[in-house]
Amino acid sequence: MHTRSSHDLTDNCHYATFISPVEPRSIKEALLEPDWISIMQEELTEFKRNKVWKLVTKPKHHIVVGTRWVYKNTVDESGAVVHNKARLVEKGYIQLEGVDDDETYASVARMEAIHIFLPYKVNKNIKVHQMDVKSDF
């Protein structure tokens, strides 16, 4: 049996105050929760730190690709919320290939790629590790 010290309980209670158990359905809902505001600010800080964007004038005959916030809770095996994620994503479905953007990028591996990669890995006896990336630029 594992006993917890008062220090362990204090740490857990302090940590729990930074996790929201509810995923917001809109930016309006997220802005009512300090936890989600903090997570969104972290995302914007990463953009600035990684020099992801710069303000430019809109080229003629091009549409502006909008953005939206996506909110997600990560849960453990027991279903308890352990992490909040907020990502600012572009609305890529309104882009025209070759006009608005000349290349695409997927931050998530496609299942087809994984189905090709895993047999190759086994055949070549390659060791593979999985990791969660906070920001991918």
Image (cartoon, grey):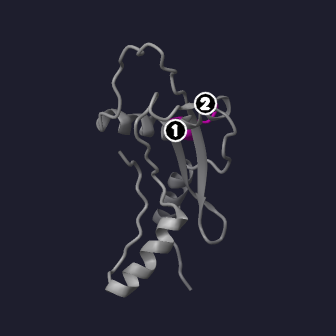
Sequence order check, earlier mark of 1 and 2: 2
Q: Is residue 26 magenta?
A: no
Residue 43 x/y as whole percent: 44, 39
Q: Nearer the viewer, residue 29 or 119?
A: 119
Q: Residue at x 52, y 38 (%)?
A: 89
The circle drawn on residue 31 is: 2
Q: Is residue 50 left or right of residue 88?
A: left
Location of residue 41 (image quadrant)? top left
Q: Quadrant of the C terminus?
A: top left
User: Residue 55 sits in which quadrant?
Assistant: top left
Q: Amino acid at mark 1?
A: Val
Q: Quadrant of the N terminus?
A: bottom right
Q: Which of label 1 and label 2 is nearer to you?
A: 1
Asked if 85 appears above or below 67 in the picture, the reply is below
Per the rendering, the mark at residue 89 is 1
- Badge 2 marks a residue whose secondary structure is loop
- Badge 1 crowding class, 10 Å Cα cut-off, few under 14, some 14 to 19, many 20 or more, is few
How many angstroms separate mark 1 from mark 2 (CA)?
17 Å
Q: Which of the two residues, 24 or 120, is positioned nearer the viewer here?
A: 120
Q: Residues within 10 Å of mark 2 (few under 14, many from 20)?
A: some
Q: Which residues are magenta?
A: 32-37
In the depicted structure, whether residue 106 falls above or below residue 117: above
Q: Which mark is residue 24?
A: none
Q: Say if the magenta span includes residue 33.
A: yes
Q: In the picture, residue 27 is in which quadrant?
A: top right
Q: Main secondary structure of the magenta part?
A: helix
- Residue shown at 57% from the left, 50% from the top: 19
Residue 50 left/right relative to 32 = left
Identify the secondary structure beneath mark 1.
Answer: strand
Picture residue at 46% right of the left edge, 50% below the top: 106
Name the residue type under label 2.
Leu
